[in-house]
């Protein structure tokens, strides 16, 4: 099956947050109905980070320049890595990689252990307290299965989000980066081509990765690798101990204590005799 | 008529029993999450029930010894004193001979010991450390939504390390403590029975301690 991907172009994004709203609407994820229910971020950004009810967040990064405020917008959501650390640590197999590259979290299987959040280098999966499960973007796999594009793509009025075969999205993204460079945005680059084995949510970073809050060289946390080593080592350790104790047991069969106590050699007594 | 020495009090045996049950349930339920193949095989509903049971027994695991500490603080001090008691020549000789004893008990004579054998002091110390580590990291994992992913990550790794330690130590602890190892046959009743040891067994296992107890006569029972 052809791998698919989303392409987000920060240079075209107007930060209208339509994608954020549509994501919530399609996936029936509520927002706080309380006035000032989210702590102020000091900008137009809705909330500080993703949460259990928010799979997609448009981030605002401001910089004062002589010409006025300069914005670096970011679409924060799951990157759908080819080597997803979240999937590796899930103890119940609730996270799987679909044939088209989507990394899906099946909330009906999730037990809410939060291991995925800890393993993800971007801390994307978030715990949904009311339901006791983790939550993250599924690339609208339900829509895609019916031949409809993801909700955020469908709604974007600025045509800043695209969806299609990953190879096409890569070509499109690279072409856009080249255009931006010609236009004077020398730091423009495409995120997701190689990171974490290749992502299925690509990002045209108009001002460079760092300006948009993207980790240049994300890696699975070392702790996740260590955990994967500890498990088989524990198994080997148990096998060795049980095997050793088994041999010990066989060698002790028929043991009798008669007469042993009288023959005991005491180190303390031996030391006294020597003196 | 047989002479016995009362080695463990009723309170100590109860706390050991409760802690033993909690530990075994925690190991079994922890294994369901620790071994992903098992978790995936039994399905998320079972895993969810197991996780709830894991938390209930975690409370018992942490609370049991704390109750013991509050009810009998002197007993706790006594355990700690034994744990950190200075090693004499017999203690060192015991450890030197122990590997050979495990595989050739019929021809290995062990030196007399104090109330807690030197080998058991090492094992108990390590077990206490692992138990404390698994308890603290377990509480952090339970409070997962209130800690940062970095802290959660470290707690998860250390919980796994402590789990491995506890399981490995428990294998040896059960083998010796339950008397599967033939020279230790019958010792299970010390913690799981009436807590008494016969004079003969006491002299064999803890010679120095038996001499002191028999001389003082405080805990000696004749039946």
Image (tube, coloured by chain):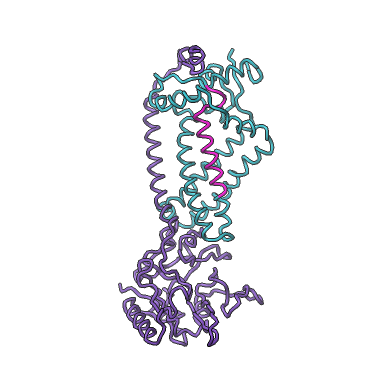
Chain colours: A purple, B cyan
Q: How many marks?
A: 0
Q: Main secondary structure of the magenta part?
A: helix
| Residue B30 lies in the magenta stretch | no
Location of the C terminus of chain B by quadrant is top right
* Residue A106 position in % (x across, y down): 45, 65
Q: Is residue B120 above or below residue B44?
A: above
* Residue B50 position in % (x across, y down): 51, 51
Residue span colored magenta: B113-136
| Residue B134 lies in the magenta stretch | yes
**Residue in the image at 34% along x and 69% along y:** A99
* Residue A214 position in % (x across, y down): 45, 72
Location of the N terminus of chain B by quadrant is top right
The extreme right residue here reads: B71
Q: In front: B200, or A192?
A: A192
Q: Is residue B87 above or below residue A263?
A: below
The extreme front residue here reads: A66
Q: Image quadrant of residue B101?
A: top left
Q: In front: B132, or A33?
A: B132
* Residue A37 position in % (x across, y down): 64, 74
């Amino acid at each position: 099956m052809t791998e698919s991907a989303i392409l987000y172009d920060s240079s075209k994004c107007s930060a209208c947050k339509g994608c954020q709203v549509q994501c919530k609407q399609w996936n029936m994820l509520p927002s706080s109905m309380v006035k000032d229910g989210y702590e102020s971020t000091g900008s137009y950004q809705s909330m500080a980070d993703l949460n259990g009810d928010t799979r997609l967040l448009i981030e605002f990064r401001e910089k004062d320049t002589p010409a006025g405020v300069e914005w670096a917008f970011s679409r924060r959501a799951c990157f759908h890595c080819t080597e997803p650390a979240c999937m590796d640590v899930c103890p119940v197999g609730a996270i799987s990689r679909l044939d088209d590259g989507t990394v899906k979290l099946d909330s009906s299987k999730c037990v809410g252990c939060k291991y995925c959040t800890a393993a993800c280098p971007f801390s994307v999966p978030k715990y949904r307290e009311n339901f006791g499960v983790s939550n993250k973007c599924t690339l609208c796999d339900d829509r895609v299965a019916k031949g409809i594009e993801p909700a955020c793509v469908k709604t974007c009025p600025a045509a800043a989000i695209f969806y299609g075969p990953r190879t096409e999205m890569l070509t499109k993204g690279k072409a856009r980066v080249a255009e931006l460079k010609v236009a004077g945005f020398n730091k423009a680059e495409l995120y997701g081509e190689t990171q974490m084995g290749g992502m299925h949510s690509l990002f045209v970073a108009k001002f460079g990765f760092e300006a948009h809050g993207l980790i240049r060289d994300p890696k699975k946390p070392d702790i996740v690798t260590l955990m994967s080593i500890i498990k088989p080592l524990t198994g080997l350790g148990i096998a060795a101990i049980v095997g050793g104790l088994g041999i010990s047991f066989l060698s002790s069969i028929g043991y009798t204590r008669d007469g042993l106590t009288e023959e005991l050699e005491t180190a303390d007594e031996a030391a006294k005799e020597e003196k | 008529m047989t002479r016995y020495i009362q080695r463990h009090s009723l309170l100590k045996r109860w706390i050991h029993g409760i802690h033993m049950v909690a530990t075994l349930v925690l190991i079994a339920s922890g294994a369901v999450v620790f071994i992903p193949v098992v978790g995936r095989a039994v399905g998320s509903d079972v895993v969810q029930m197991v996780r709830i049971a894991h938390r209930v027994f975690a409370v018992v695991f942490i609370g049991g010894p704390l109750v013991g500490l509050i009810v009998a603080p002197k007993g706790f001090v006594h355990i700690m004193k034994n744990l950190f008691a200075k090693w004499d020549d017999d203690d060192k000789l015991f450890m030197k001979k122990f590997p050979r004893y495990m595989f050739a008990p019929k021809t290995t004579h062990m030196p007399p010991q104090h109330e807690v054998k030197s080998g058991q002091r090492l094992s108990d110390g390590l077990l206490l450390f692992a138990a404390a580590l698994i308890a603290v990291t377990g509480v952090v994992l339970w409070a997962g939504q209130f800690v940062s992913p970095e802290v959660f990550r470290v707690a998860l790794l250390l919980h796994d390390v402590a789990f491995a330690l506890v399981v490995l130590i428990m294998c040896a602890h059960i083998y010796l403590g339950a008397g599967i190892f033939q020279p230790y046959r019958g010792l299970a009743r010390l913690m799981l029975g009436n807590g008494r040891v016969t004079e003969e067994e006491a002299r064999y296992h803890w010679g120095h301690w038996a001499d002191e107890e028999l001389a003082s006569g405080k805990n000696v029972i004749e039946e």
